Amino acid sequence: MNKMKKYISLFLCAAIALTACQNLTPEKIVPNEEYAGSRASVELSSADPIPAEGGTITAKVHRSPAFEVSLPKTADWVTVSQSDSTLSITAKANPSAVTRFAHVSIIDKELQISVTSFDVVQAGTDKDVKPITYKDFSAGPETISVAAKETSAIISVTAEDVPWTITSNNPAFTADPASGNSNASVTISFPANTAKEEVSAVITVSTTSEEVNTQSFTITITQEAAKDEKEAVKPAPGTVLAEWYFATSQVDALAAHFSEAVTDDLADAPGNGGLWVEPNVSGNGRLEYYNGIDKAAAGIVDKAHKRCKRAIGSYGEPVVYGTYKGDYILWTAYAENESPLAAGTKLSLNFVLRPNNFLIMKYWLVEYLDGDEWKVAGTAKEADGFKYNVELTFAEGSGNQTNTVINPVVTLSKDTEAAIFRITATSDAGCMDGAPVTLINASHALRFAGEDCNANTPHYSVKEHPIIKVVE
């Protein structure tokens, strides 16, 4: 009977305690007030919330039988230690701006019911705390593919006063420089591949700095397997090795491998961005546009003057935004079965360029690959320390965009893997008045002119499509 009376008395105390807890306010730590007839009460060392950075308060439990403490599972930020009737309650730092609560129950060990309870309240973090800012650190591109005979590749490191190092899982692939603490264009060197299997290496650019968001980036370089030697051929005169057709009807076909978002990392990095335009009439080859420099490392990164972007225009014309000194165009065409072209083969390339702005590069040099050597196609002029044999123009007034026909004819003196022509911007002069261009602009477009154009500018149209063929 005595045990039953104790149970009823403690049950009433628990009910009164629960009712008291419903009147808590988030600004204070409020224990149950002692009601008439209750057996237990709690005396706290402080009625103020525990600060956001964390802290400890004590709770003295009065007039309670032997007890234990109960916390909800969600209160993992609170720890409670007990010494006789005194509790030590510790809160971890609160990373949130929101005030948080933990309901603490005092449980009668014998009857396993709550005899009193109270809330622990912790203030939220100051909402005006500044967000963490990180220094710039990145490296790319993520993947690079090179031919078997190539012996180097270039990667780009962007670092804002961040020390970095480069390691390779293949000792044959070495970096220069192998470390630094700022933006850099890094050359990865390796031997030509003479094996029949691909060779690869994973290059890791990393930092130990805790001031960056990501501390490590990897670049995978894959070198093609060596190809079987084939006998060089001399195709018949008039043989078309590759032909392209730039027109509105061909937009989708041309864009298959030549669409680049302005945010792509590869648009900054040296190389072709992994993009090309395939012949859509006949033959086997590629049109590519290469960044000749690391534009990010050169500091050409602000949005108003944003590097290279490759695309197919609405009229089916390949377009390059942001030409710069050192950039180059590469036209490639292969003989049947990709056999080398024999010495004595005479080749011609025909295509048309049209700048849409006077800040496009003015002077370009056309070269061709003869064996393993680049040679000037035709005669080069010299001016202020650079050579050129193509001069783009942009006139004032209406109809100011000018088509420039580029039509080199060359004869190979050595067996050569393919018909390959390179057209390089050799000066920073703009194409109207020749004034230096110090910053490229994302809206400045160099077009490979095609058959279609705006109805108001029919004179921009060309009838001869890009073609590489054997002359004799």
Image (cartoon, rainbow, N blue to C red):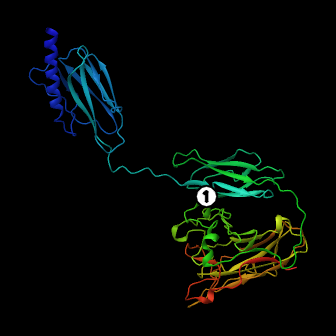
Q: Quadrant of the C terminus?
A: bottom right
346 or 369: nearer the viewer: 346
Q: Residue at x 53, y 66 (%)?
A: 302
284 or 167: nearer the viewer: 284
Instruction: Farthest residue to the top: give it.
Output: 1
116 or 349: nearer the viewer: 349
Q: Is residue 48 above or below residue 472?
A: above
Q: Could you say where residue 230 lies in the image, as x and y percent from the top left?
A: 88, 61
Mark 1 lies on residue? 183
Q: Is residue 124 above or below residue 466?
A: above
Q: Could you say where residue 337 lies in the image, as x and y percent from the top left?
A: 83, 64
Amino acid on which disc 1 is placed: Asn
Q: Could you say where residue 396 lies in the image, as x and y percent from the top left?
A: 58, 90
Local crowd at mark 1 within 10 Å, few (<14), some, or many (≥20)?
A: many
Q: Could you say where residue 21 lies in the image, as x and y percent from the top left?
A: 18, 32
Instruction: Farthest residue to the left: give it.
Output: 36
- Give the side of residue 84 with respect to residue 195, left or right: left
